[in-house]
Each structure stands twice: as C-alpha cells, then as structure tokens.
Amino acid sequence: MCDHCEDFHRTVLMLGSLAVYADQTGADQAFIDAVGPCLAASLPEPPPGIFPPGYDLNEGPEYPGEGW
C-alpha cells in the first residue's frame, strides 16, 4: 500500500475511533471538540479508486442554509 493510502486509511480509522469514543458515557466533550476537526482537516486527498471516475466532491444536494 502506498504511503498516501496508509495516511488516508489511518486518519479515517482515527475518526471512526473518535466517533465510537464520543458515544460512550463520560466521554470528554472538550477533547472531542478539539481533536475531531483537527483529524478531519488533516485528511489527505483520497487514494485513487475511492470515488468513481468523474466524481466531483463539490457537486451534490444543497444542504439547509446553502444556496441562498
């Protein structure tokens, strides 16, 4: 596996672990609020093959509060 792919998968696993931790009773919300956005921001570009050819990450449905 390429280094780029390992970084992506490792970061996704850490985000998943953080989500599991966040659902536990007594989870430290300050920790979750600090670490979650940092992990999300550190995601590298997805490895080739994750999305179908021609997929545009900027396309999709409008979410509430967007498109005004």
Image (cartoon, rainbow, N blue to C red):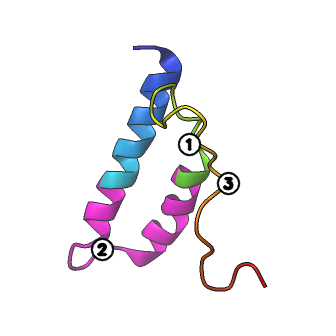
Q: Nearer the viewer, mark 1 or mark 3?
A: 3
> Does 66 appear in magenta?
no
Q: Few, some or many C-alpha atoms within 10 Å of disc 2 (few <14, some 14-19, many ≥20)?
A: few
The answer to which image quadrant residue 21 occupies is bottom left
- Choose the circle earlier in sequence order: 1 or 2: 2
Instruction: Say which residue label 3 marks.
Output: 58
Tag 2 secondary structure: loop
54 or 35, nearer to the observer: 54
Instruction: Say which residue label 1 marks.
Output: 43
Identify the residue at horizontal 79%, vertical 85% (top origin).
68
Tag 1 secondary structure: loop
Identify the residue at horizontal 49%, vertical 37% (top origin).
51
Say if 29 sits above or below 11 in the image.
Answer: below
Magenta residues, start to end? 17-39
Q: In the image, is 32 to the left or to the right of 4?
A: left
Q: Could you tell me the amino acid type at mark 2?
A: Ala
Locate the N terminus by quadrant: top left
The answer to which image quadrant residue 59 occupies is bottom right
Q: Are marks 3 and 2 in contact (CB under 8 Å)?
A: no
- Choose the circle earlier in sequence order: 3 or 2: 2
Spatial CA distance of label 3 from label 2 is: 33 Å
Residue 32 horizontal/vertical position (percent): 44, 68
Spatial CA distance of label 1 from label 3 is: 16 Å
Q: Few, some or many C-alpha atoms within 10 Å of disc 3 (few <14, some 14-19, many ≥20)?
A: few
Q: Are marks 1 and 3 in contact (CB under 8 Å)?
A: no
Q: Could you tell me the amino acid type at mark 3?
A: Asn
Counting labels gives 3
Instruction: Say which residue label 2 marks.
Output: 27
